[in-house]
C-alpha cells in the first residue's frame, strides 16, 4: 500500500488559504516528498509528520511555490530537528545551485555543522532515476521554460503515481501518464486561457483519453475554488491522505 499525504494543494497565491505545493509519498518505511513550497514545513508540523522522516525530495521545477521551502527544511534540520540520516534532493539540471543560492539569498547557512549526508542529483528526461525504493521517470512539462519544468512518473514497490508539477496541456500528456494507479494533476484554471497551466475545462474534455485508475486535481486556483460544486473530478485538500 502506498500512502499519499497532500501537504499543500494551493497555487502560488495560497488561494482559499491553501498551502503551496507539497505531496508526501510513503511506501512502508520509505518516503519521497514531491515539491517543497514555502509552507511545507508548517504543513508537516500541522499533520504531525516529522520532517526527518523524509528520505528524498523531488522538485518538479524552479518556481518558488514549488521549491522555495527547501532551504527552510534544511535550516530546520540544523537547528530545530537535528538530522542524522542521509537526504537526497533531486530536481532539474542546476538543482544544487538553486538550493545553495536560495539559502545564501535568505542568509541561511545550511551547511554549518551539518551532521548528515546531503546529496543532489539531476533529472535526465527519459532516464529513470532510483532513490530509496522509488523509481522516477522525468518527462518535460509545458511551463515557463526558465524554470526547467518536469512531470514525474513514480513507481513505488507495488503502486504507480504520475505527478504533473506545473504544466499546460500538451497532446502527449495522456500517453505519458499511461495506466498509473494515481494521476495527481494540477488544475489552476477553470477555463482555458493560459498556455502554462491546465484547466478543468480541458481535463473534462480530454478525460476519456486517460487510462489512470484514479485522477485527483491539485494546485487549485481561485477560479476553481469558487466553482467547486461544478468540478467533475476528485480534488485534493490540504492534509488529505489517500491510500493507493
Image: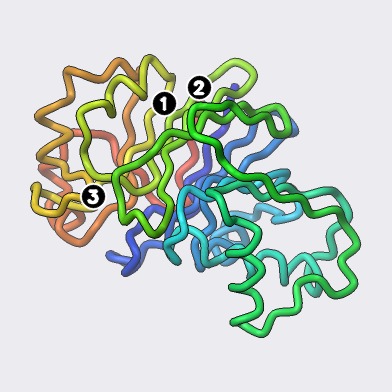
Residue pointed to by mark 3: 197
Q: Earlier in the sequence, mark 2 or mark 1?
A: 2
State the image coordinates of residue 34 (x, y, percent, origin top left).
53, 45
Q: Nearer the viewer, mark 3 or mark 2?
A: 3
Classify 73 as above or below 183. below
Classify 214 as above or below 239. above
User: What's the mark number on residue 182?
Assistant: 1
- Asked if disc 3 and disc 2 are in contact, CB closer than 8 Å, the reply is no
Mark 3, residues whose alpha carbon is within 10 Å: few (<14), some, or many (≥20)? Answer: many
Q: Is residue 185 left or right of residue 58?
A: left
**How many numbered marks appear?**
3
Mark 1, residues whose alpha carbon is within 10 Å: few (<14), some, or many (≥20)? Answer: many
- Asked if disc 2 and disc 1 are in contact, CB closer than 8 Å, the reply is yes
State the image coordinates of residue 165 (x, y, percent, origin top left).
40, 45
Residue pointed to by mark 2: 160
Q: CA distance from mark 2 to mark 1?
A: 7 Å
Q: Residue at x 62, y 62 (%)?
A: 45
State the image coordinates of residue 104 (x, y, percent, origin top left).
65, 79
Amino acid at each position: 500500500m502506498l500512502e499519499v499525504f497532500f501537504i499543500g494543494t494551493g497555487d502560488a497565491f495560497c488561494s482559499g488559504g491553501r498551502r503551496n505545493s507539497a505531496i508526501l509519498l510513503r511506501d512502508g518505511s520509505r518516503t519521497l516528498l514531491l515539491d517543497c513550497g514555502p509552507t511545507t514545513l508548517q504543513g508537516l508540523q500541522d499533520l504531525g509528520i516529522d520532517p526527518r522522516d523524509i528520505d528524498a525530495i523531488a522538485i518538479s521545477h524552479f518556481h518558488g511555490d514549488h521549491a522555495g521551502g527547501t532551504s527552510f527544511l534544511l535550516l530546520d534540520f540544523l537547528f530545530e530537528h537535528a538530522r542524522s540520516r542521509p537526504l537526497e534532493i533531486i530536481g532539474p539540471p542546476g538543482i544544487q545551485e538553486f538550493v545553495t543560492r536560495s539559502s545564501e539569498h535568505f542568509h541561511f547557512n545550511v551547511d554549518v555543522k551539518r551532521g548528515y549526508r546531503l546529496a543532489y542529483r539531476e533529472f535526465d528526461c527519459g532516464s529513470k532515476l532510483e532513490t530509496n525504493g522509488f523509481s522516477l521517470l522525468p518527462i518535460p512539462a509545458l511551463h515557463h521554460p526558465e524554470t526547467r519544468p518536469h512531470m514525474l512518473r513514480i513507481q513505488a514497490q507495488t503502486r504507480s503515481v504520475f505527478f504533473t508539477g506545473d504544466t499546460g496541456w500538451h497532446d502527449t500528456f495522456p500517453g505519458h501518464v499511461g495506466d498509473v494507479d494515481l494521476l495527481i494533476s494540477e488544475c489552476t484554471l477553470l477555463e482555458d486561457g493560459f498556455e502554462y497551466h491546465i484547466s478543468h475545462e480541458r481535463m473534462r474534455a480530454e478525460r476519456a483519453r486517460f487510462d489512470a485508475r484514479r485522477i485527483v486535481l491539485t494546485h487549485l486556483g481561485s477560479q476553481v475554488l469558487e466553482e467547486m460544486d461544478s468540478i467533475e473530478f476528485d480534488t485534493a485538500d490540504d492534509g488529505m491522505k489517500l491510500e493507493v
